Image: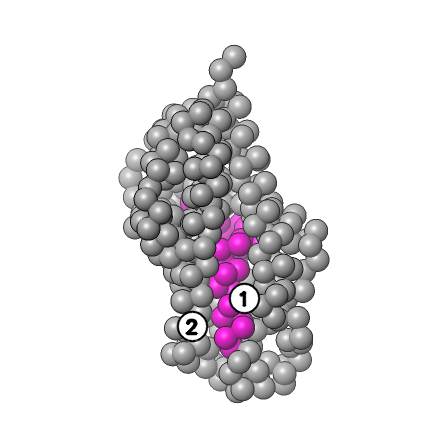
Amino acid sequence: MFSPAEVAKNYVTIGKNKANLPIAKMFVLGILAGMFIGLAGVGASTAAVTIEGASVGKFVGACIFPAGLAMVLIAGSELFTGNCLLVIPLMEKEITVGKMLTNWVVVWCGNLVGGTLVSALCVGGHQLSLFSSQLAVADLSTAAAKCSLSFSDALIKGILCNFLVCIAVWMAFAAKDVAGKIVGLFFPVMLFVLEGYEHSVANMYYITVGLFAKGNASYAAAAAEAGVDLSKLTVGNMFFANLLPVTLGNIIGGSVFVGLAYWFVYLRKK
């Protein structure tokens, strides 16, 4: 495996290549990553809703969700949260602030399209009808809860989430084979899901699937019968109550607590 210092050095080249991708390719790879993460969310939710014990169900879902990052890193795509590490080649003066911000914006938008596409296909294909629409109720409850977070809670949970996600990416880059990469990324991602932190790209699926499900009369009726309050599940709250603070938190957690920290330790010139 590569040492942490070698990972830092290698990421300078990796990040430079990411920042210099043509915009169209960057966007398409962002869509793919959004779909990978969204499909991991579908799997995690589907598995968790079949288990009566909430804590056990959450643990099972947390063990399934790392499949999303595994697809992102091994199949090849661009994930906004992982790209918060672009601060490393920025500090090495291999890319500009403009290049980094362009990558973040384009990839974030691509991730949103990918996550929304998965949501639309799942609702359109009646995936949420599984288990007598209990999957729909679970998804609506999750989406409503995410849109009800305070700004500070969403920000802090975003910081903690992307600290773990970027550590997962870092550990995956330490491995030299596919199996090692999957093992390396698994536990940090499992932890962030289990601990209930907020991942902006995952939320692009979790909230949009709730919004689409809210528009389905039978799903909305099942949620109302279960006592789920959908009043705060709106497009406005998705962006301003969740994605905005969570994205800012993800940037802090990934860029500052991981990227800048490891750049300072391993690459900063004395």
Q: Residue at x 59, y 40 (%)?
A: 252
As displayed, is residue 4 above or below residue 138? Answer: above
Based on the displayed image, in which of its 4 quarters is residue 177 positioned?
top left
Span highlighted in magenta in the image: 185-213
Q: Amino acid at mark 1?
A: Ile
Q: Amino acid at mark 2?
A: Ala
Circle 2 sits on which residue?
120
Q: Residue 198's spot in the image, x, y percent?
A: 58, 54
Task: Find out whether residue 205 is within the magenta segment.
Answer: yes
Q: Residue 47's spot in the image, x, y percent?
A: 46, 68
Circle 1 sits on which residue?
207
As displayed, is residue 234 above or below residue 67? Answer: below
Q: Residue at x 55, y 78 (%)?
A: 214
Q: Residue at x 57, y 82 (%)?
A: 220
Q: How far apart, in angstroms, are the residues tagged by discs 1 and 2?
A: 11 Å
Task: Find out whether residue 21 is within the magenta segment.
Answer: no
Q: Earlier in the sequence, mark 1 or mark 2?
A: 2
